[in-house]
Amino acid sequence: MEIEDSLAEAFWAVARRLRHRTRVALEPWDLSPSLARALSVLSRHGDVRLSTLADHLRIAPRTATEVADDLTRLGLAARLPDPDDRRATLLTLTPAGSSAAAEIQAARLAEGDRFFAVLDDTERADLSRLMRKLSSG
């Protein structure tokens, strides 16, 4: 089988296309995909330590500090003392961050719907089932 015909290459081509369209969908907020993902983590999980943010984003703790610095500088997040450990800091969404997270989530869902609109209901169900199977194993 030629490399262009392999399933892995087809998968990566689709992933690149979806990633590009997601980046375009994020342009109104002028945020990198990593900052948008961090907003999503905070929106879903509430206040988190930077080490927890790093775990969720699968990045180094030092990089999580940079993400927190950027979100704080943009007014989308704030640092709070951790009530359980006075040496630790929590990152929390500001009202602007909560609003941006909700808007970005809606934009990403809409872009996903547009992206997968070429598939009929049966194809979507099949793809969803296959993706869940691949991601669990």
Image (spheres, rainbow, N blue to C red):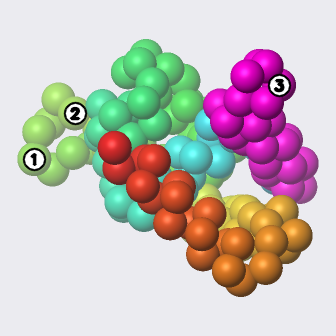
Q: Which residue is label 3 attached to?
A: 4
Q: Secondary structure at mark 2?
A: strand
How crowded pointer 1 is (Cα within 10 Å; few <14, some 14-19, many 20+) is rated as few
Query: What whole-number distance in Å separates the C-alpha atoms at marks 1 and 2?
Result: 8 Å
Question: Given contact means CB atoms under 8 Å apart, are the residues at marks 1 and 2 in contact?
Answer: yes
113 in the magenta segment: no
Q: Quadrant of residue 50?
A: top left
What is the count of numbered marks?
Answer: 3
Residue 35 falls left or right of residue 38 = right
Amino acid beneath label 1: Asp
User: Furthest residue to the front?
Assistant: 1
Give the residue number, with chain letter if any, for mark 1. 84
Amino acid beneath label 3:
Glu
Residue range corresponding to the magenta coloring: 1-28
Can residue 43 be seen here? no
Asked whether the viewer can see residue 62, the reply is: yes
Front residue of 130/21: it is: 130
- Image side of residue 95 versus residue 50, left or right: right
The amino acid type found where label 2 is placed reads Ala
Q: Which sits earlier in the primary sequence, circle 2 or circle 3?
A: 3
